[in-house]
């Protein structure tokens, strides 16, 4: 079903009528010469210019790409609010296979599209885009972060993303077991790419036992080669979530990891990972709570990367960023306390805190 413009009606319903909508602006971008097809979604600029990454992904349909951009942009509003940043939420998706379709011409065209928004949206890396890509985008758009140090940027933001997730795990352990130490805990990581491989190192340094999986065998083998002890691998995520004695499950790939099929069989007592939009649909957070599984809200614990790229706009200082990312420990504990006080799941508590900050900004 389509509306009068030919756009899928369900996408427009999401944008204008559903609780998941409310976005300020959605821009459809096309450059036929380079093959660029992109969606830029701005959910909120109440706290400042929208900040969020650029995802390059082979979506099955354009409607799927728009829906993903809407969801990711909304998540960035909440993430930036909870990270204490003066930024709203936005996200861009480029439709295509980055291995096949990504070219310099396409990235330059994308940079011109972002620049046309005049600073309302600040872009960075995400799935399928890298520091080298942002260096190219920045040639056409000054509102670009996640660039290389050689080009005035902060470099790979996954370093502090992993550090923030690690702090979220420590806070979860403190809340659930009364001790933030992860020594001896068994942690399962689904996805050991950009963020996951840094997370492995943090956990091993503290003496945790790590179980990993990834859809790419080479990513798994790289971890096993780098860490011949302390790490084991399983065939897939289905096997990982069923590992006996698992203390913490860390989804670090794409979203939707927590759903009606995975939650009932999950053996872990804590979920704390880097992936965005881990809850497949509203209500999953209650299913986790009903099973006694503590969920550290994804957009809270994975905010280390956005803290880093936001700082790049003001003259990057790694130590300053790391100190701010370390506060994810206290923020996560505060969410758990609010959830207990209000009698709601942690995801709902985090939403309330973020929504209040955005509402206060709009009212001021």
Image (cartoon, rainbow, N blue to C red):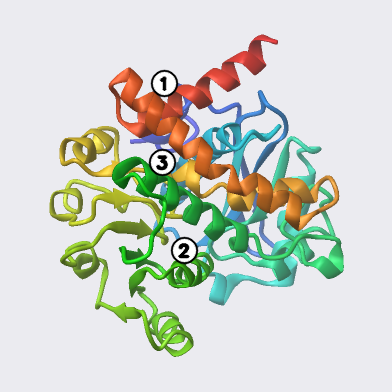
Foreground residue, 305 or 177? 177
In percent of the image, x 43 and y 54: which residue is there?
Answer: 275
> Alpha carbon of mark 3 to alpha carbon of mark 1: how far?
25 Å
Query: Between tags 3 and 1, which lies in front?
Result: 3
| Residue ID for mark 2 | 58
Which quadrant: the N terminus? top left
Foreground residue, 229 or 109? 229
Q: Position of residue 269 (x, y in %)?
A: 24, 50
Query: Between tags 2 and 3, which lies in front?
Result: 3
In percent of the image, x 37 and y 64: which residue is there?
Answer: 183
In this rendering, position of residue 307 left or right of residue 260: right
Q: Are marks 2 and 3 in contact (CB under 8 Å)?
A: no
In percent of the image, x 26 and y 66: which residue is there?
Answer: 237
Q: Are marks 2 and 1 in contact (CB under 8 Å)?
A: no
Q: Secondary structure at mark 1?
A: loop
| Residue ID for mark 3 | 297
| Residue ID for mark 1 | 17
Q: Secondary structure at mark 2?
A: loop
In this rendering, position of residue 45 left or right of residue 97: right
Based on the displayed image, in which of its 4 quarters is residue 231 positioned?
A: bottom left
In percent of the image, x 19 and y 67: which residue is there?
Answer: 243
Q: Secondary structure at mark 3?
A: loop
> Alpha carbon of mark 2 to alpha carbon of mark 3: how far?
27 Å
Nearest to N terminus: mark 2 or mark 1: 1
Q: Farthest front residue?
A: 179
Nearest to N terminus: mark 2 or mark 3: 2
Which quadrant: the C terminus? top right
Q: Position of residue 213 (x, y in %)?
A: 33, 73
The number of numbered discs placed on residues in the rendered structure image is: 3
Crowd class of label 3 (few under 14; some 14 to 19; many from 20; radius 10 Å): many
């Amino acid at each position: 079903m389509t509306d009068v413009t030919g756009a899928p009606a369900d996408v427009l319903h999401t944008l204008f009528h559903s609780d998941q909508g409310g976005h300020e602006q959605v821009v459809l971008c096309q450059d036929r010469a380079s093959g660029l097809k992109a969606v830029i979604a701005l959910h909120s600029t109440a706290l400042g210019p929208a900040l969020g990454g650029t995802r390059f992904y082979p979506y099955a349909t354009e409607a799927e790409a728009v829906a993903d951009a809407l969801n990711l942009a909304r998540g960035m509003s909440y993430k930036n609010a909870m990270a204490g940043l003066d930024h709203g939420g936005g996200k861009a998706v480029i439709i295509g296979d980055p291995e096949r379709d990504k070219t310099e011409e396409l990235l330059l065209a994308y940079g011109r599209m972002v620049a046309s928004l005049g600073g309302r949206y600040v872009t960075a890396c995400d799935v399928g885009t890298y520091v080298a890509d942002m260096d190219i985008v920045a040639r056409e758009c000054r509102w670009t972060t996640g660039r290389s140090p050689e080009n005035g940027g902060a470099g790979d933001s996954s370093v502090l993303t992993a550090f923030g997730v690690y702090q979220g795990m420590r806070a979860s352990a403190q809340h659930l077991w009364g001790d933030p130490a992860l020594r001896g805990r068994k942690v399962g990581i689904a996805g050991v790419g950009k963020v996951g491989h840094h997370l492995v190192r943090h956990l091993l340094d503290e003496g945790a036992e790590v179980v990993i999986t990834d859809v790419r065998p080479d990513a798994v083998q790289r971890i096993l080669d780098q860490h011949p002890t302390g790490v084991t691998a399983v065939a897939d995520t289905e096997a990982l979530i069923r590992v006996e004695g698992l203390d913490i499950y860390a989804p670090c790939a794409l979203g939707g990891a927590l759903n009606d099929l995975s939650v009932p069989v999950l053996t872990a007592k804590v979920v704390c990972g880097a992936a965005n939009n881990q809850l497949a649909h509203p209500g999953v957070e209650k299913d986790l709570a009903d099973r006694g599984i503590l969920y550290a809200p994804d957009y809270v614990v994975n905010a280390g990367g956005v803290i880093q790229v936001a700082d790049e706009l003001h003259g990057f200082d790694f130590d300053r960023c790391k100190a701010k990312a370390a506060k994810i420990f206290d923020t996560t504990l505060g969410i758990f306390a609010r959830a207990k006080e209000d009698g709601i799941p942690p995801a709902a508590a985090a939403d309330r805190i973020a929504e209040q900050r955005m509402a206060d900004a709009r009212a001021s």
